Image (cartoon, rainbow, N blue to C red):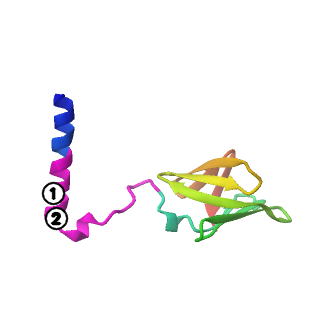
Amino acid sequence: MALSLTRTSMMAASVASLIAAGPELAIATEPAGRPAADTVIGMWVTANGFIRLELMADGRYDEARGQRRSAYRGRYEVRGPQLVFFDDSGFTATGLVTDGVLRVGGDAFRRE
């Protein structure tokens, strides 16, 4: 029970310090290392240029492979540091953005 009270007290102190700091500090931001939804929007490309992954502002993606345009299409969600892809054909994949590199499966993408 003491642990629960300690957590509650810590939470109350954190909230109180945010309120005291003013509205500028209380605005939610993404913690370091986590991509915000608007920071992943754009074209991501593998080093050899074979795979081009476009992440659109409406939460959709379009992936081209070689000369095959729109090889995969679907929607994506930003969940903390991860991107979760839901392909229109039914499969799902998870990606992780770290240090400006998006890794999905065995592929590494950089922003174009």
Judging by the rendered image, the residue that carries numbered circle 2 is: 21
In-image side of 31 versus 6 (left or right): right
* Quarter occupied by the N terminus: top left
* Quarter occupied by the C terminus: bottom right
Q: Is residue 111 in view?
A: yes
The mark found on residue 25 in the picture is: none
Q: Residue at x 60, y 50 (%)?
A: 95
Q: Is residue 90 above or below residue 62?
A: above
Q: Is residue 19 magenta?
A: yes
Residue 64: horizontal and vertical position, in percent?
78, 63
Residue 73: horizontal and vertical position, in percent?
74, 61
What's the magenta region? 11-34
Amino acid marked by disc 2:
Ala
Circles 2 and 1 in contact, beta carbons < 8 Å: yes
Residue sticking out furthest to the right = 67
Q: Is residue 99 in view?
A: no
Residue sticking out furthest to the front = 1
Q: Residue at x 60, y 55 (%)?
A: 102
Residue 35: horizontal and vertical position, in percent?
48, 59
The mark found on residue 17 in the picture is: 1
Q: Residue at x 18, y 68 (%)?
A: 22
Amino acid marked by disc 1:
Ser
